[in-house]
Amino acid sequence: MTFDLGLIVGNPFYLATLGLAAVGWIVEFAGAAASQIKGIAWFYIIYELCLIIGILIAIATNALSYYRSSILTFLAVGIIFQIQIIDGDIGVSIPEFQAFAAGALFIAIVSFVWVIAFGAEDGSLVGGTINSWSISNKPNNPRNVHPDVGFPPGVQISPGPGQIPMTNMQDQVIVSPNADYAYKAKALYDYQASPEDQTELSFTKGEILDIVDNKGKWWQAKKADGTIGIAPSNYLQII
């Protein structure tokens, strides 16, 4: 998977929550260091740092959907740790201990928000709202590079029974409407099919498509209404 900070910078929700979590951790760490806290509290601090970095990596590699269950579990454990810190130090009159507890409170609030956000399905109000905030640039349109089918440019292939020819300037590709759809993919961006190629599919961000094969730059896909065609793979994510 490619690490792309643009996936964080391009989404205000991810950018804001990661930023707040980082500020909370720095305050918590500074308070712990100043108050010379010892023991298991440092395990909590290191645990939260690893969790924040892990979430950052999952977002930047577009892998949240793959690790959602694990992240939610670690967040739940982290919230328990932070509540213990808050309960033990928030009432102490020493400023260093109060800073330690304040940082933990910051992280706990962000963690609660993440549990709601990451636990929401993509088609839900929460999931749809977060995705709609994304201002990341779409990938380059791959229309000039149609599927890698192993045939040199210009080769003509006649469609067989029950098959639909898929063509463009360079290749002529045949896709069967009776193919087995082994995968499902989520659209990461809106895509408008070229009016010059009747085999391309138009779809909207968040739409779920059935996919025959996940190899190559273009995939044979089927929409929920049964429409089939080809879709650019860099606009989709296997789920």
Image (cartoon, rainbow, N blue to C red):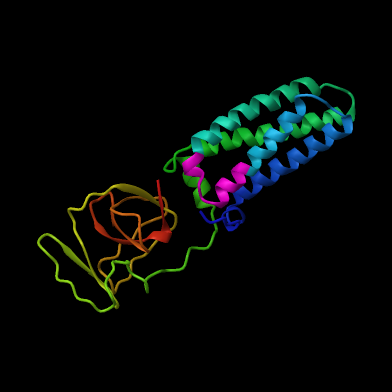
Which is more toward the observer, 234 or 8? 234
The secondary structure that most of the magenta stretch takes on is: helix
What's the residue at 66%, 39% (across, down)? Answer: 50
Which is more toward the observer, 211 or 27? 211
Quadrant position of the C terminus in the picture = top left
Tell me: residue 155, above or below residue 201: below
What's the residue at 55%, 58% (across, down)? Answer: 135
* In-image side of 234 versus 133 (left or right): left
In the rendering, at what x and y percent does residue 54 appear?
61, 42
In the rendering, at what x and y percent does residue 106 appear?
72, 35
- Asked if the stretch drawn in magenta spans residue 20, the answer is no
In the rendering, at what x and y percent does residue 79 appear?
64, 28
- Asked if the stretch drawn in magenta spans residue 63, the answer is yes
In the rendering, at what x and y percent does residue 228 appear?
24, 57
What's the residue at 36%, 62% (across, down)? Answer: 216
Q: Note whether residue 166 is visible.
A: yes
* In-image side of 108 versus 58 (left or right): right
Q: Note whether residue 190 is visible.
A: no
Write down the region rendered in magenta: 54-67
